[in-house]
Amino acid sequence: MTTLTIRPVEDADLPFIRSLSPTLAAKAGLSWHSDAVVQKFQDDYIDAMMAATDVRNATYVAVRGDEPLGFVHVREREDEVSGEMVATVPLLAVKDGAQGLGVGQALMAAAEDWTRANGFRLLHLEVFWNNAQGRHFYEKQGYLTETINLIKPLG
């Protein structure tokens, strides 16, 4: 079996990253929004995160041989509680069939390394509440719940 490698993103990886948008959208489980709305949100969010910016950021891709298996995007942001600059992971996705193989763990380790190398004390992330698998994954990695956003569909 070929070794898993984590490497910086290349322009040629962008179609792969965008191909994971439906996987991310499906994990959201937002029944009060149409599938089309959630998919458009996810597509637009990926495009916004991958666009050129002055915000310090990095994207890493996990590959086995020549096959991409997942990616993580990490960037700086202001912490809502303390006001300090911290790192955040707005995007992490592992393709179907590669989940449970340690790909997500390796990608999060790369994000944590980037966070430390850039002098940040905290690494923030958000996960949709309905994504129980994602919440469990992050909790196993030592992430703690800080806030929960609630919504009530009224019609």
Image (cartoon, helix red, strand yellow):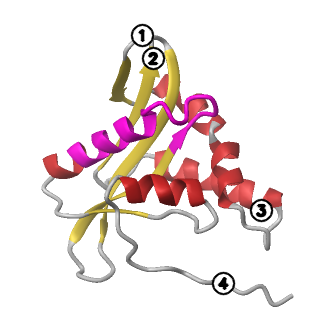
Label 1 sits on residue: 2
The mark that comes first in sequence, 4 or 2, is 2
Among the two numbered marks 1 and 3 on one chain, the one whose residue lies closer to the N terminus: 1
Gap between marks 4 and 2, in whole Å?
A: 40 Å
Reading the image, the residue beneath label 2 is: 64
Of the image marks 3 and 4, the number of the one nearer the N terminus: 3
| Residue at the spot of label 3 | 37
The question of residue 144 being in magenta is answered with: no
Give how far apart the Cα atoms at labels 3 and 4 are.
16 Å
At horizontal 81% and vertical 57% (from top left) the residue drawn is 36
Q: Percent x, y for residue 2?
A: 42, 10
Q: Identify the mark nearer the N-term, 1 or 2.
A: 1
Residue bounds of the magenta highlight = 93-113
Residue at 66% x, 60% y is 28
Looking at the rendered structure, the secondary structure element under dot 4 is loop
Type of the residue with mark 3: Val
